[in-house]
Amino acid sequence: MKSLEAGEPAEVGRYRVFAVLGQGGMGRVLLGRSPDGRLVAVKQVRPGFAHHSGFRERFRREVAASRMVSGAFTAAVMDADPDAPTPWLASMFVPGPSLAEAVAAGGPLPPYSLRYLAAGLAMALGEIHRAGLVHRDLKPGNVILTGDGPRVIDFGIARAIEGDSELTHTGAIIGSPGFMSPEQARGQAIGPASDLFSFGSLLVMAATGQGPFTGSSTPHTLYNVVHAQPDLSRVPDDLRRIAEACLAKDPGDRPDPAWVLRQLGPIAPAADPWPQPVPQLFEAQQAEVRELLNPPAPKHSRRVLISGIAVAVVVLLVAAAFVAIKLLKPPEPAPAVASAPPPGTAVTTPVNPDPLGPDNLRRVDLCKVLAGWEAPVLGALAVTSPGRRLDCLYGALKLGVGPSPIESVPAGDLEGLPMYTSTFGSSCTAAVPVAGLQNVMLLSEIGGPLSPDEMCAVAKAGLGEAVRRIRAGGHGRDMAPKSLIGLDPCALLWPERVARVIGPVRATALEDLHQCVYQADGTLRLVVELGYPPHGPEQAAAGGVVPVEVGGTTVYRDERPSGGPPGCALTWQHRAMTERVGENVRVTYEREGGKTTQQTCAKAEEFVSALLPMLPKP
């Protein structure tokens, strides 16, 4: 751990760097500052990696995926340059002690802190996996405890290096032995389920002060990871159930982050989520980093000048060592102590904190957002078509969430977001992306007798006002406690469980706020929607719909669903809202090659049977 050597570049890309925070097998970490004054952690990849075929392209893909991850519970990726002579990635510098430091200094976390930690980590993993990433090295040193929750750091590089057989010899593994998954310890291919195993190990360590598989040596630890059953007797009861499920040796038996969050239930806000000495560690680190970046000004006296230089050097070394230990070499955890289990919890799905993310937008009533707003040309807006799922009509202006508009083109920034506009036919649409989703936009559309320029001006103004109001909050839907409208359909079943029904899942995509698509040998769609009861006169008139019993629920099967390829659709009403409209769930499985209709419907029914127990009871 040292300051920059004389003659070393003081800038990496557009970031001014001050010190080396740490070095490891993949490169080094520098403390820097962005042009707008924010502190950043700049990870420089070892130059040797850049010379290997395919590394830069893999690194570019990993960085692009990392940028899709919300910064709510991670160190958000801010910038990168895969094409630099020494490739680098810049992420937010997250102040705070690591989980390893906190446990070493104060012992195991109390129950309320454990629940806070578990919820934050599950949210972080959900965002990482939704972006198509696997962390690969989730360990106590890569979890930072901040004042508003845990943060997961150091993702986005490991897979680019792991993907090259020249960089990682056969059987080589990337990760920390005590927190690896069995498949990772064996050097096998890994997926999101590997991170859930590491999450279970972290939870045990935080609750007891010791990792569940720690042995007398690295080979002993790896043997325990693959073969031994951990002792969970000192983990609180409700968290023990979560840890036990996550620590299943078979990846297919592990849950996903959404399941963990449902088991935890709502987490009450806390002004001080962490016990002592976490706040003291945080303040000490902040003071040392301030000294590192702003050493005392020298005096005119030669004696004072020499003394000041000596003090600054000492502060620099202490601060660099402190931050380096935090990032790269977490200390051994303190001895374990028992803790009492917290009270039982309810089942729920928490809200993603990004106001323009899909989880929050599901809970926004679009018909409340612009009501009463004085729109240019149109005047005060009033709702003319309430009760819709993904849009609301305010006379000539429509506010909605949907796919990118036809023939859209970039049109600058709107409220800090990239904006696109489309003039198609006699209408103009302005759109900004929904955070974390591809090709799903928040849109403002207007049509009518106005000129194209006038229409686009109104659409842009309406969209800007909608973004500001959604970020400000206060426009929530009036939803029943057991409503499905606020749930992420892709989080109801983890991909490994889906794969048991339809085979290996090549891709999982949220196509809009309420529709999840799994691509395997066939295509399975899960949709939550508002609509007529599936057994009503409209469905009866269509013909071909028959009731079947699946998991104790009457489900209506359509063996020839319209509007798509041959397959099987299963629909049931989860909750009635009025005599004619309710919340429906529809599962459509497009027929695989060579499969009969009966076989295709059997697969769809098997999926529904697995899904029903995961839904809240109306």
Image (cartoon, grey):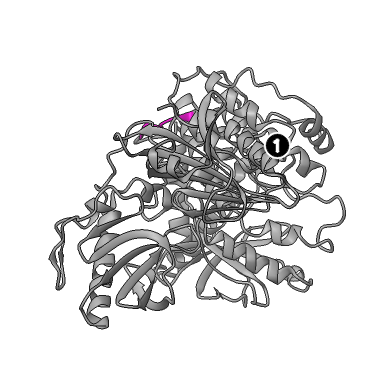
397 relative to 98, above or below: below
Quadrant in which the N terminus is drawn = bottom right
* Residue 198 placement, left or right of 340: right
Quadrant in which the C terminus is drawn = top left
The residue closer to the viewer here, 607 or 212, is 607
In the rendered image, residue 574 lying in the magenta stretch gets the answer no
- Residue positioned 75% across, 68% down in the render: 49
Crowding at label 1, few (<14), some or many (≥20) Cα neighbours within 10 Å?
some
* Residue 433 placement, left or right of 124: left
* Residue 281 placement, left or right of 230: left
* Residue hosting label 1: 252
Q: Residue furthest right?
A: 170
Q: How many marks?
A: 1
The majority secondary structure of the magenta stretch comes to: loop
409 relative to 612, above or below: below
In the rendered image, residue 266 lying in the magenta stretch gets the answer yes
Q: Where residue 159 sits in the image (x, y, percent)? A: 70, 57
The residue closer to the viewer here, 365 or 468, is 365
5 relative to 513, above or below: below
The residue closer to the viewer here, 146 or 312, is 146
The amino acid marked with disc number 1 is Gly
Answer yes or no: is residue 517 visible.
Answer: yes
- Residue positioned 63% across, 17% down in the render: 233
Query: Magenta span covers which residues?
Result: 264-269
